[in-house]
Amino acid sequence: MGRSACCEKVGLKKGPWTREEDEKLLAYIQQHGHGSWRALPPKAGLQRCGKSCRLRWTNYLRPDIKRGKFSLQEEQTIIQLHALLGNRWSAIASCLSKRTDNEIKNYWNTHLKKKLIKIGLDPITHKPKYHALDCNQPKDIANLNHMAQWESARLEAEARIISESKLISDVYHSTATPPPPRPPLLAPPPPPRPSCLDVLKVSQGAWGTPRKGVTITNSNGFSTTNAALTSVSSMLKFSDTMLSASIDGVIHEHSFASDIINYVESPGACAIGRITSENNQDGYQVKGIMDNSLQIHDMVADWLRFPSFLEGFTDLQSGSVVTGPADNAVSEDNTNSYWNNILLPSTHKWIRP
DNA sequence: AAGAAACACAACCGCATGCCA
DNA sequence: TTGGCATGCGGTTGTGTTTCT
């Protein structure tokens, strides 16, 4: 696969953008849309490569991006999501409306990483430094191995889920419902759930009360623009789809938490039961998929063995109130509270029961 | 006041991936 | 199926600004 040659052309300007260039780019996109980025620069009268224009637009000029200082809540969200997702900046950005992945990445590297280091946490593992570095302890090695295996399985399964969920959806629509025209849904579909918050429902449903000091409200405050967010959300979306798809073509509202617990307690059984019943001729196909997906069951079961891993993400709920230090005026108590709210669950309770 | 060091962030680089002819 | 193109993404670099000595 050849690389784009646009950046290798000679005579194109590089480096910081001038005000005039910004205005040209902005004016052109407002009038025509960006279209093909590669074709844009000459049309807009810019001596830049298309890639540079795209970057300037997506990271700076786009009208729907928020600039300026990160709020306390945004900081907390980034830290929590980073603990879950690692350096997947675009996935993290999709949960922070109006922030670009580049901005979040920079903020992490210049501020948050240092904050974690300063309080003795490893910015990669989000665990106390000695956990990450002192691998002489058999228990530590076991934990790290377990995490590595878990992550490996998760990534592998994620790839499969994405393709399989599509297949299941196709099977469902081609067999469980009559041919077109599609019957109308008897009940309106539930409002789209912010994908990044799927994991929260599990933690709330499975372990009931939110953590002390955290006020849970609703989850409407996050951007839902990026549907393909994360492995976690894609996995849960898959499960949600499976469990919500009833053979009679009616979309039922389910308690997501109880569904996923049912799924864990009886891997595949509930979904397969529903789909293969009623003489679904493609049941064998679905069952095959589910057999293939038993790994998912293991993963979710792992989550349930590590409830503390998920507990920490309750703070992601929009409107959740987490007391934190005011900038430049940080009392020690508030600092402790701030970090406890963010970090305690995943740093102090990770050890396998 | 001047130079050095540290910091912050915009921009670049190059690989990965999806789409399409 | 293959190859070219466009775009997404994460790591890295460059440059302007601020703080320190």
Image (cartoon, coloured by chain):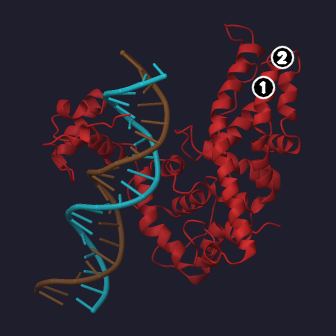
Chain colours: A red, B brown, C cyan
A248 or A165, nearer to the observer: A165
Q: Disc 2: which chain?
A: A
Q: Residue at x 15, y 42 (%)?
A: A10
Report x, y in % for residue A340: 65, 72
Q: Is residue A202 above or below residue A83?
A: above
Q: Residue at x 45, y 48 (%)?
A: A98
Gap between marks 1 and 2 measured at Cα: 10 Å
Report x, y in % for residue A197: 65, 47
Q: Is residue A216 above or below residue A198?
A: below
Q: Is residue A208 above or below residue A282?
A: below
Density class for disc 1 (Cα within 10 Å; few <14, some 14-19, many ≥20) is many
A251 or A11, nearer to the observer: A11
Quadrant for residue A296, please give it: top right
Q: Is residue A213 visible?
A: no
Whether tag 1 and tag 2 are in contact, CB under 8 A, the answer is yes
Q: Quadrant of the C terminus of chain A?
A: bottom right
SS class, disc 2: loop
Tell me the amino acid under the disc marked 1: Val
Residue position for label 2: A280
Q: Disc 1: which chain?
A: A
Q: Residue at x 65, y 51 (%)?
A: A152
Q: Quadrant of the N terminus of chain A?
A: top left
Q: Is residue A141 above or below residue A263?
A: below
Residue position for label 1: A286
Q: Earlier in the sequence, mark 1 or mark 2?
A: 2
A340 or A263, nearer to the observer: A263
